[in-house]
Image (cartoon, rainbow, N blue to C red):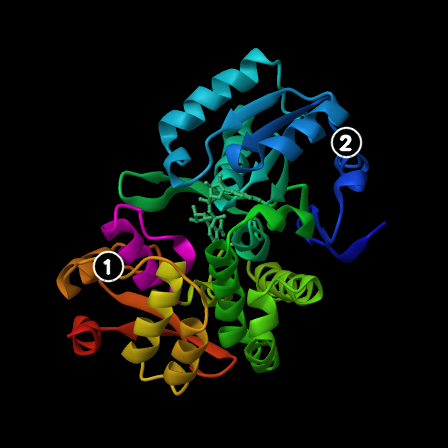
Amino acid sequence: MDVSYEIALKERGRVVTGRDLMPQLPELLRSVGADRMVLLADAGVAEPAAQLAEELGAPILSVPGGEALKTWAAVEERAQELLEVGATRKTLLISMGGGATTDFGAFLAAVYMRGMRSALIPTTLLAMADAALGGKNGVDLGIHKNLLGAIRQPDLVVCDMARLTTLDDAAIAEGLVEVVKKAAMLDAEIFEALEGDLDALIARDPAAILAAVDAAVAMKLGVVQADAREADHRMLLNFGHTVGHALESLSGFALPHGTAVALGMEVECRMIESEITARLSALCERLPLRGARPEASAEEIWALMQRDKKSSAGQVRIAAPRRLGQGEVFEVQRGDLLACLN
Ligand SMILES: NC(=O)c1ccc[n+]([C@@H]2O[C@H](COP(=O)([O-])OP(=O)(O)OC[C@H]3O[C@@H](n4cnc5c(N)ncnc54)[C@H](O)[C@@H]3O)[C@@H](O)[C@H]2O)c1
């Protein structure tokens, strides 16, 4: 089997990465053990999804993919479809697509009959390097990202690099942001390797991309296995996200998630006067990201930061590295944001 990296999770499930896993997928999925399988397929990967469904003899629930999918109304609609195809708690829901589809599908699997089996096949670099890992799932409530959700480890995650060929360069860059984020917080050596390999990564050198995904899986699952419920340590994975989510909301979700996180990391580093601010900005500037900071005042951004899930009793907390590879959680004030945005 062409598996590059495999990790079994403490709670349940396992994550498998590799370069051309399509021939092994049916066997991997069957190893979960289920009474039947249903494939929730992102329109962005309609062709390989149709091929997989045929091999498995599984019905397909087609979804458009993208953030617009992540609504409560869509959960109700797709749950009805699961009922119509006879899905039970022992049925495996396979969610194949970008991070929006894996977030949505994993949430649907968590609430359908109080929890059915769930496998994720992330098909964007961002979903492989972040969204499909760690068990967090959910949908949005109006402009509030991921406000309705659960933490539940999937039974299986399969990251097949073959899926990345149909993505554009900006989508690859957005995924790389999530790898950079983790390395900046957790591992100086990986950060330095990313700096060195960035041109190869942007050019999609297969070995470099697979190494970056493997590093992301190891870093994220290392943190999640220590703190699945986000008591403390898991917050370290939120670098760039407190400001980033606010920017995404204020753009009406037009700003891609990876770009929002890159912008968020830069602002959050400046807020805590991090010594890696310039180095991180230089790295992100080399990435062909799309989208720019939405027209929004610092007050509007701050108001949304106060509603972030890490905040409580009006205290806003961000996770950021003051030194490379040594992320911490900081309490920040409105003035810190105003000082670096004005
Ligand atoms: N649960 C978590 O821990 C976590 C972490 C990070 C991000 N996320 C979520 O991930 C989502 C962003 O994920 P994303 O960046 O993958 O974007 P996305 O899921 O919105 O997908 C972007 C577009 O790419 C298309 N697509 C998917 N795979 C493709 C492929 N192989 N080839 C061509 N097109 C393809 C989709 O149809 C969609 O149009 C956000 O909703 C974010 O909140 C979740």
Q: Which residues are magenta?
A: 240-258
Of the pair 335 and 312, the residue shown nearer to us: 335
153 relative to 22 in the view: left or right: left
64 relative to 86 in the view: left or right: left
Of the pair 248 and 287, the residue shown nearer to us: 287
Identify the residue at image location x=57%, y=29%. Answer: 40
Asked which secondary structure carries label 2, the reply is loop
Q: Where is residue 210? Give x, y as percent.
A: 68, 61
Mark 2 Cβ inside 8 Å of ligand 1: no
> Please, what is the three-letter code of the amino acid marked with disc 1?
Gln
> Please, what is the three-letter code of the amino acid marked with disc 2?
Gly
User: Image quadrant of residue 298?
Assistant: bottom left
Identify the residue at image location x=26%, y=61%. Answer: 293
User: Image quadrant of residue 209?
Assistant: bottom right
Of the pair 166 and 84, the residue shown nearer to us: 166
User: Image quadrant of residue 66?
Assistant: top left
Q: Of marks 2 and 1, which one's residue comes earlier in the chain?
A: 2
The disc at residue 33 is 2
Q: Residues within 10 Å of mark 2 (few under 14, many from 20)?
A: some
Residue designated by label 1: 306
